[in-house]
C-alpha cells in the first residue's frame, strides 16, 4: 500500500540560523553547554585539589599560580558556569514540581535565571579580584 502524502505543501525552513528561538531555548541550550564545560574542567579542579593537598610547597606553588590574571579569569569562568548551571537546574526542579510549566512561566523563569546569573557573575568577579 502506498503511503499517503501530506496535504500540507508549505515549504519547510530548516535553516537554523534564520529561526528565532525563544529565550527558554537559549537558557536550555546554555544549561547543557555549562554542564559540558563543568565536566571538561573538572579534571583541572581535581588536579588543583591534589596539588593543594600534596605538600605545603605544592600548596604554595598552586596559590602563586592561582594569583595570576589568567588563572583568576579561569576561576571566574568556572564559578560563573557553576552558578549558572545550578540556577538553571533549580529552575528545572521547580518546573518538575509543576510551577512555571506554561510558556509565560518558562519565559519568566528564564529571565530570572539570566538576571541572577549576571548578578552572581558580578559578585564572583568582585570576590576573585
Image (spheres, helix red, strand yellow):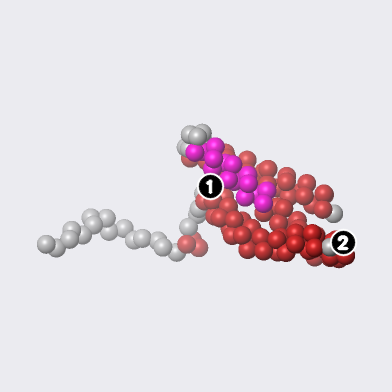
Q: Depth check: 68 or 29 in front?
A: 68
Q: Does residue 86 appear anywhere in the picture?
A: yes
Q: How many marks?
A: 2
Asked if the magenta segment contains residue 43, the reply would be no
Coordinates of residue 60 in the picture (x, y in percent):
88, 62
Tell me which residue sits at (71%, 56%) in the image. 78
In which quarter of the view is residue 7 placed? bottom left
> Which residue is labeled 2 in the image?
56
Q: Is residue 12 left or right of residue 100?
A: left
Q: Is residue 80 left or right of residue 9?
A: right
Q: Depth check: 56 or 16 in front?
A: 56
Start and end of the magenta stretch?
82-96
Tell me which residue sits at (82%, 49%) in the image. 127
Q: Main secondary structure of the magenta part?
A: helix
Q: Depth check: 109 or 55 in front?
A: 55
Q: Residues within 10 Å of mark 1 (few under 14, many from 20)?
A: some
The local secondary structure at tag 2 comes to helix
Coordinates of residue 95 in the picture (x, y in percent):
51, 38
In which quarter of the view is residue 45 placed? bottom right
Label of residue 24 in the image? 1
- Is the residue under label 1 in contact with that under label 2 (CB below 8 Å)? no
Amino acid at each position: 500500500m502506498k503511503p499517503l502524502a501530506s496535504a500540507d505543501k508549505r515549504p519547510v525552513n530548516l535553516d537554523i540560523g534564520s529561526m528565532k528561538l525563544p529565550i527558554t531555548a537559549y537558557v536550555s541550550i546554555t544549561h547543557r553547554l555549562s554542564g559540558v564545560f563543568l565536566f571538561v574542567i573538572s579534571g583541572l579542579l581535581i588536579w588543583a585539589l591534589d596539588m593543594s593537598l600534596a605538600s605545603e610547597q605544592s600548596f604554595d606553588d598552586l596559590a602563586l599560580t592561582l594569583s595570576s590574571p589568567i588563572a583568576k579569569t579561569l576561576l571566574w569562568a568556572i564559578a560563573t558556569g557553576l552558578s549558572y548551571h545550578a540556577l538553571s537546574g533549580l529552575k528545572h526542579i521547580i518546573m518538575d514540581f509543576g510551577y512555571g510549566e506554561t510558556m509565560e512561566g518558562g519565559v519568566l523563569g528564564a529571565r530570572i535565571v539570566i538576571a541572577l546569573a549576571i548578578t552572581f557573575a558580578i559578585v564572583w568577579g568582585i570576590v576573585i579580584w
